[in-house]
Amino acid sequence: MEEKAPEHGHEPHSGGLGSRLNWLRAGVLGANDGIVSTAGLVVGVAGATADRTTILLAGLAGLVAGALSMAGGEYVSVSTQRDTEKAALRKEKRELAEMPEAEERELADIYEGKGLSRELAERVAHELSEKDALRAHAEAELQIDPDELTSPWTAAWVSLLSFSVGALLPLLAITTPPVGARVWACVVAVVLGLVATGAISARLGGARVRPAVVRNVLVGCLAMAVTYGVGLVFGVTVG
């Protein structure tokens, strides 16, 4: 177990990779939301009317509203997370200034709990504290990289762009073909899109691909079926 100590020096790099994977996963899930919500909207409208302009305008309105809602929600959520991280770092910095010995013992306790001998844990804690005590405590105790705090603006842009890209798939698929093929063209495009996003998100999360894909496709098809049925019930005739 003593081999764990040298790995600490590489944690910022692995943390950066983990952060990039989290953004990529968030982008895939944002695209998935854009596909499902917009598909449900345009298929529902297509069930109510065959007018291409009406379907297009409804889809565009849903795309803009959904993308802005996703971006705003992510900005607020990640801003709160960033504020929490900053507060934790300020508290840790204050404690290091007021009681450095106790904080070093606490750091040694953490490494001892991970399997190091007490002697090695104390040596690791002392050397890391000599180099950068705040970073050592932030990474070991708080699981925060001080140089890689979450960015609310990045989260907002990732959500906005990924949702918009996902929403364009059903919107184009239902407004491009002739009237008789619109709904089925949209269904096929959406299923293919959901297969892709389900597979990618499962691989990024280390989960089994097939259950994720099946679940993703079923939810998307259910949403389209329900909204199409609602559109048929409340449909209008366009002259």
Image (cartoon, rainbow, N blue to C red):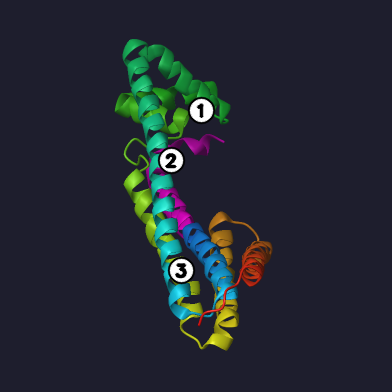
Name the residue: 48% across, 73% down: 55
Q: Is residue 192 visible?
A: no
Name the residue: 54% across, 25% down: 112
Q: Can you give x and y, in whole percent of width and height, for residue 38 in the image?
A: 51, 65
Q: Can you give x and y, in whole percent of width and height, for residue 107 in the image?
A: 45, 23
Characterize the local packing of mark 3: few (<14), some (14-19) or many (20 or more) Cα atoms within 10 angstroms: many
Q: Which residues are magenta?
A: 1-27
Nearer the observer, 84 or 144: 84
Amino acid type indicated by mark 3: Gly
Is residue 53 one of those drawn in magenta? no
Of marks 2 and 3, the one in the foreground: 3
Q: Where, by quadrant of the figure, is residue 90 drawn?
A: top left
What separation in Å lies between label 1 and label 2 (alpha carbons)? 32 Å
Of marks 1 and 2, the one in the foreground: 2
Name the residue: 42% across, 63% down: 61
Which mark is drawn over residue 24? Answer: none
Tell me the residue that label 3 is attached to. Answer: 59
Amino acid type indicated by mark 1: Tyr
Q: SS for tag 2?
A: helix
Amino acid type indicated by mark 2: Ser
Nearer the observer, 233 or 42: 233
Tell me the residue that label 1 is attached to. Answer: 111
Q: Where, by quadrant of the figure, is residue 6 drawn?
A: top left
Tell me the residue that label 2 is attached to. Answer: 77
What separation in Å lies between label 1 and label 3 (alpha carbons)? 54 Å
